[in-house]
Amino acid sequence: MLSFRSLRIAWPAYGLIFILLAGLLGSCGSTRTLVYMQGQFDTAKLSHVLAKQDTIQKGDVLSIIIYSDNPEATKIYNQPVITTGGSAVGGDAGGIISSLGTAPPTGGYMVDENGNIEFQGLGLLHVDSMTKAALRDTILNRLKDVLTNPYCTIRIANHRFTMLGEINRPGIFTIPGDHLNLLEALGLAGDMTFYGRRDNILVVREVNGRRTFGRMDITKPEIMASPYFYLQSNDVVIVEPNSKKVPANDQTLLRNISIVTSVITLAALLYSIFKK
């Protein structure tokens, strides 16, 4: 049985154990900071947000395919675009292709430094800052006199964006589809790491030769109304580390293991002393 004197001696040791354990447990943060799209959704506002149409930029490679009621007459206007080395991410990726380690597309129409393309059969076309719909109308207006019922599809073959920072699979990704939002981009890149800040994601974008910057908080539904929610070609997404991220994670883990081991050893020693 413990005497009053032994309790007075043991109390500082037990107090030290309590402080150490409280410090370790206190380091476990709430998972609330990891949850996306928290709170109430303003459906009346967010349901009417439309994705902005991408505009063609200098350096883009355009895949333009012409169709008509006369396939033989149409062949002269078509130039294939071949992408080598691409692989779908995650099995059935819905047409989303990662360009990590792949060769650039060959063929197609490269938009030169003046914003022009040399289109087969039509000559020089100025396409810089045009939407794909506007370019489609321009081409079809030029072809309607030489082809029967012409129509065409236009795709930016090197439509891509970059994911950097606290991302499980950082890199450059190519998107064949027309639209991609930030949440889809995070899924394509394997989502953030535990240490990524969900409330301050930086999107760097070039608009008419000038860089613009958008900060995104994906813990709030309101990001869907942001002009940076839908990514555009050549966007760079940077995920910053949170306060729990330290330069030497391995050393921190070993230190915490050492503290826990010391606490357990001290507790066992005190138990063996005072149980007598």
Image (tube, grey):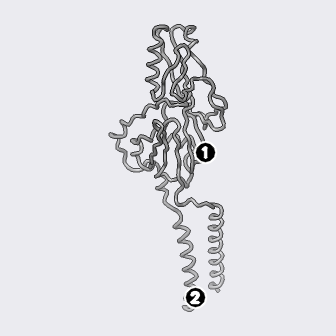
**Counting other residues with Cα less than 10 Å from the Cα at mark 2, is it few (<14), some (14-19), or many (20 or more)?**
few
Q: Position of residue 13 (x, y in %)?
A: 58, 82
Query: In what element is the residue under mark 2?
Result: helix
Q: Amino acid at mark 1?
A: Arg
Which sits in the foreground, 210 or 233?
Answer: 210
Q: Position of residue 187 (x, y in %)?
A: 54, 42
Residue sitting at x 65%, y 74%: 262
Query: In what element is the residue under mark 1?
Result: loop
100 lies above or below 116: below
**Counting other residues with Cα less than 10 Å from the Cα at mark 1, is it few (<14), some (14-19), or many (20 or more)?**
some
Which sits in the foreground, 89 or 240?
Answer: 240
Whether residue 270 sits left or right of residue 27 in the image: it is: right
**Which residue is denoted by mark 2 in the rendering?**
9
Q: Name the outermost residue toward the front.
A: 114
**Which residue is denoted by mark 1 in the rendering?**
169
Which sits in the foreground, 117 or 18?
Answer: 117
User: Closer to the N terminus: mark 2 or mark 1?
Assistant: 2
The Cα–Cα distance between marks 2 and 1, rounded to whole angstroms, is 54 Å
